Image (spheres, coloured by chain):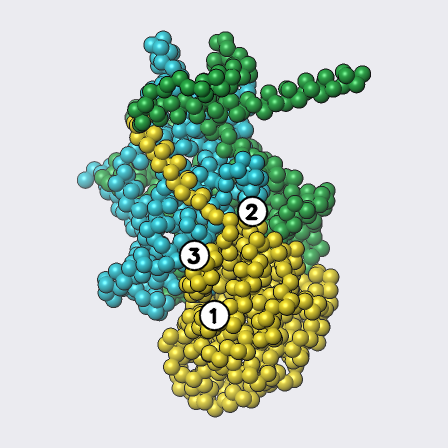
Amino acid sequence: MTNERKATFILEIIAVLLLVAFFFPFFIVLMNAGKTSQEIINAPMAMPSSISQFYINVRNILTNPSVRYGRSFFNSLFITTFSLIFINISSGMAAWVLVRTKKKYSTLIFMFFLAGMVIPFQVVMLPLVRFLEVLRSWTGIPFKDTFHGVILAYMGFGAPLSVFMFHGFMKSIPIDIEEAATIDGCTKIQMFFRIILPILKPIFVTLLVLNGLWIWNDYLLPVLIIGMNGKVRTLPLAVANLAGSYVRQWDLILTSVVLAALPVIVLFLFAQKHIIKGMTSGAIK
Amino acid sequence: MKKILLSLLALLTVFTLAACGGDGSKLVIFQNKVEIGTALTTYANAWAAKNDVNVEVVTCGGDSCAYGTQILAEFQKAEQPDIFVIEGMGGYNDYKDYILSLDGEAWLTDTDLEFKVNGVAYGFPVAVEGWGMGYNKAILTAAGVDPDTLTSLAAYTTAFAAIQAYYTANNMTDYVVVSMAAGSGMEWVTGLHNFNGYLSSGLTPGDSSVIDNLNDGVVNTARLQAYADWVELLFQYSPNSILIDGTYDIQVQAFDSGKAAFIHQGNWIDPNLDEATFEIGYAPHAAAAGTNDAIFISAPSYYVINKNSDNIEEAKKFLQDLASTPEGHDYMVTKAGMVAAFKSVTLLPDGKLSRAMVEWMNEGKIYSWWQNDMPSGFGMQTLGPIYTLYARKTITKTEFIARVTTEIQDLG
Amino acid sequence: MKNLKSKILNGLFKIWVFLLSIPLVLIYVPIRGIVRQFRKIVLKKHDVKHHYQGHNRTLLALEKGALGSNETAQTNRNFIYFILAAITPYLLFVIVPFLMGIYFSFTNWTGLNTGNEIFIGFANYKNIFSSFAFAYSFYRTAIYSVLNIIFINLVAFLLALLVTQKLKLTNVYRAGFFMPNLIGGLVLGYIWQFIYRNALPSIGGILTNSLISNPDTAMGALIVVITWQYAGYIMMIYIAALQNVPTDLIEASKIDGANAWQRLRTITMPLVAQAFTIAMFLTLVTSFKQYDTVMALTQGGPATTLPQFLQNIFAAPNRTVESLNLMAINIYDSAFVRYEMGVGQAKAIIFFIILLIISLTQVYYNKKKEVEL
């Protein structure tokens, strides 16, 4: 073995060990999701005695009336999907004209968007709820406890980071293509969807992942806008509802944690190649 | 691509409309006991069907769903909850602009536990709860301790020592004398429940002198001294694995498995005592000097009706039916496992601690609950951390007293 | 004279109505476009002229009046239309509530006296600046953020270096290290609470005492959690930057006999300086805003004694505070636990200003470094 190959081999071992360390918490959760509440408290580090307990726990979660897994799952999926589409397209469009318009005001507007990144959610949450009520009384359209309310809120809160990232990426796209397209008689909107968006693919994917994870896992915003109760409830709210009582039913909590994280993990594993390629192809600058 | 986008858009519109199909005349009950959530929803739905009223029960409680956050958000809306929960004077002071007087309701004659301010009734007692030193009769008997004698600090000192000696003699290394938790997340046990000993032990029920002093920033030094001795004793006999590192589950588990002689919890742990086959009773907290011959019993929270509600009549009827119909009784006691606050209720829950508590209640040996009359956040956020430090032995008893004193004086 | 006054008022009113109509038109026109497309493509109906047309023409005329109709106007129109979808929700859901929040910080709003709050000037701010608890909270947040930034970036950069080597399973490693980021703060908090409270103590040894119940180790325990969660994400940023380092440069330096450390210092580091700026900015902001993980993990605890220097500054001897009462939690507590919404808002505004200053400084300095290198 040459020196270099030796070094690579050692690095490979280190990487595998680190990977194991990174998976350790997942492993603990998965292991305990297959036990009864008693077993968890008494021997949290032991392997589950039988696999069937895992099925029992899963069934308990799926049939639990305060979780309503299917319903919550659907709500989460719905809210996440539409928020993502709208955030990405609206921010992409905004970032594009902000980059291409070389005016003072476009820099100002960009800065204005950036300011949103440092606004802590705690500052706006209660005034937000109050303002939604004002909006409702002005327009007659309810925003609380509705899908569009949550989705619009995510568009608002997601805009700063998304505009920021699109903006950074777009600066590196040469303008020649657009000029050529203009000569070909493309309108602005056609140009955006047919030419710009395909170029934006890596950053688009990156933002899908980042915003998707944030929205899928978010807790405080859905609590405020759609509340813990009601017909619209997302998965994190359902898990929190379960973990809410002072008694920690760890068997149920850990199983629901597994079930809440599972869809994301499965999706990630399937799209892993694209996601990593997107995220590492110089998208974030 | 365009087609897909457009059909998605259409789908969105459909669901948006579906989601906001709410109607105005709905009785919304906003409550904070997670453990009774399902039972209450079932009962409310049955009641709704019978009375042809729309009812929705919103449950938000425990430590992950901050009741405060949610209810504040609810009160920013035009449609607010019709029935919600307060826990005592602290909550009353925060919400008084919204609370309807319930004077003249029929159920008032059937209970002594309604929430009153200046003689006006405002709150419907959700249940009766109580705590003392829950004990495992088997261990006490084996160690030669008679629970009836446990009324003073001296008696407890002797008893704890005797139990410890019994453990040592029989090589019971994983047994504990007191199962009590004072770490982070358990401030409700120390800063509220335990501290109530200072506020009410040894006083006649309804005597608010100590809590009034506290709210004025005045400390009853002698009482605080005696109380600190009691805390010291409890902490001394509670193992660090529970006292400092323990969570609620670990604390209850120790008692449930029969390996703890005493537990510092109320009758609400009954549903979690599924292994316990031994006999269980309550003994008083020896928090005041001299003899302590009662345990802390009260209504833990009250349903109040929102003054601005459009459904006041329905709300009143809901509460009345809860107190006076067999279905209401059945829900409170059998389904939700609570001890009802109404004299006409003859049912009793199965829980061993609940039954032990009822014995004390029937004898009239009651100390009041004053912990909910402290300002919001004072017990858990301000006092709780001091207990944690004392449990960790970072501070001495003298410092413990000094710090509690400073915080109380700050309220003045 | 009276005539003139009413004329002016009348004119002002017209301008006001006109100004109000602009956003309406701006929103209406694209919606009309979408509806038309929808009818055409999905419903397969072609637009027929109907009586709304007149209405539309008025609106279009209004829009033209607002924006003009020459080429510049066309550019402006595009600019506005393209930016509208992003800026409207941002204004409505972030900026307006934020401005409302600034106003509320000067009132005695409790959250329950909504509509009846009284303007009380700087009383809330005075209250905060004399509070040792808030000062302590800021102090802890600062320490936490610095440590967090160092740890996350260090781990992330090392991971990035590792997985950009010629290893067999690079993609598996990348996916694996990114994985913790898939789980949200609250759920993550529960998982780690279980690990710290139940799983690790059962191993025994030095782990017998839970790390999160000791004020000296709790912050370290939290940093482990956040690094575990966040390092994989930041790693991706570094990978992107490292891949842009030209290989021929590295090869050339190898031939020149530079060792690995020299190569890293003189070639790689300067070229990824830009990535450091963004990664540090992101970690800074997340550290400062940390809320739900801490809340689910320890609820702000465990307790500790106020440090000596703060005791001296605030003349507050022997006070008790909570060691992980970070600023986000402190704000939340005043607002929702103590029902002091005005104070909570004021704290939040201070928090915002601090965060703004720190992040601007950080970006400014990092940018300066980028140029120097």
Q: Please tell me which of labels 2 and 1 falls first in the chain.
A: 2
Instruction: Give the residue at mark 2.
Output: B77
Instruction: Establish if C216 lies above or below B131.
Output: above
Q: Position of residue B42 (x, y in %)?
A: 41, 63
Mark 3 neighbour density, 10 Å: few (under 14) some (14–19) many (20 or more):
many
- Is the residue under label 1 in contact with that under label 3 (CB below 8 Å)? no
Q: Colour of chain A?
A: cyan
* Total count of labels: 3
Chain in yellow in the render: B
Q: Is residue B409 left or right of residue A245?
A: right
**SS under mark 2:** loop
Residue identifier under label 3? A241
Residue B228, x across and y down, in percent: 63, 74
B220 vs C279, left or right, is right
Q: Amino acid at mark 1?
A: Gly
Picture disc at residue B328? 1
Looking at the rendered structure, whether the residues under marks 2 and 3 are on a common chain is answered as: no
Residue B2 in the image: state x and y as whole percent.
32, 26
> Compared with residue B178, is residue B50 higher up or lower down, i.e. above or below?
above
Q: Residue at x 55, y 22 (%)?
A: C22
